[in-house]
Amino acid sequence: MSSECVTSDLLLTLVNTRPSENGRVDQLDDVPGLTAWLAGAGLTVSDPVTGADVAAARELRDALTDILRVHCGCGDASAAEAEAYLRAVAVRYPAVLRVTVDGVTAEASQTGIPGVFGTVLAAAADLAARGAWPRLKLCKNPSCHAGFFDKTRNQSGQFCGAACNSQMSMRAYRSRRRTAPTA
């Protein structure tokens, strides 16, 4: 698996903790939820997770979601607010550059929950440096809106998978049939 996929997976697992109409529940609604997400993402913290950490995680998730919404062509005025929020938290959860003979990577400069959020922001910076940041999108299926990595050659992907693509195609077909004039 490429490091691009690993980097995007961290961001997508955070974005996909949001609830949706297709049965996905909010995984960041309490301390046990955030703790479970951390474990599932392979992130460990030594300090106990607090309610303030949960609120901060939700704010970060929501800002990233707004940015991914713009990437899929569904952006709105909240993108400017999301960018401003992300600029502010980048100061709070800084990343530092690690220069090696193999290249340069960004990594969190703190430990604990601030380090986790710094790691998420470093993953975004890594994707941007690779030119892959615009490939992180939200599924255009209104009952899904899952985050996904667009693997299409021309970055034209609109749905997280074939099931959502098929569902939206069927909705469009039914809509055309309803509005078609009868002879």
Image (cartoon, rainbow, N blue to C red):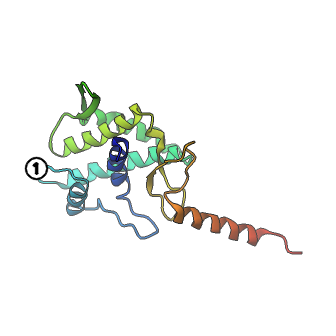
Q: Residue at x 44, y 52 (%)?
A: 148
Query: Residue 163 in the image: x percent, y percent?
Result: 52, 66
Q: Residue at x 42, y 37 (%)?
A: 83
**Relative to 134, 14 lies left or right:** left
Q: Nearer the viewer, residue 5 or 88?
A: 5
Q: Residue at x 37, y 51 (%)?
A: 12
Number of disc labels: 1
Q: Residue at x 22, y 45 (%)?
A: 116
**Relative to 122, 50 lies left or right:** left
Question: Relative to 89, is 5 above or below?
Answer: below
Residue sticking out furthest to the bottom: 183
Q: As shown in the figure, which amino acid type bears the numbered disc 1?
A: Asp
Q: Nearer the viewer, residue 64 or 92?
A: 64
Residue sticking out furthest to the right: 183
- Give the residue pinned by disc 1: 47
Query: Residue 63 in the image: x percent, y percent?
Result: 39, 45
**Relative to 59, 50 lies left or right:** left
- The quadrant in which the C terminus is found is bottom right
Residue 2: which quarter of the image?
A: top left
Question: Relative to 175, is 60 above or below?
Answer: above
Question: Relative to 148, is 106 above or below?
Answer: above
Residue 104: which quarter of the image?
A: top left
**Relative to 70, 40 lies left or right:** left
Query: Residue 81 in the image: x percent, y percent?
Result: 43, 40
Mark 1 residue crowding within 10 angstroms, few (<14) / some (14–19) / many (20+): few
Q: Nearer the viewer, residue 154 or 56?
A: 154
Element type at mark 1: loop
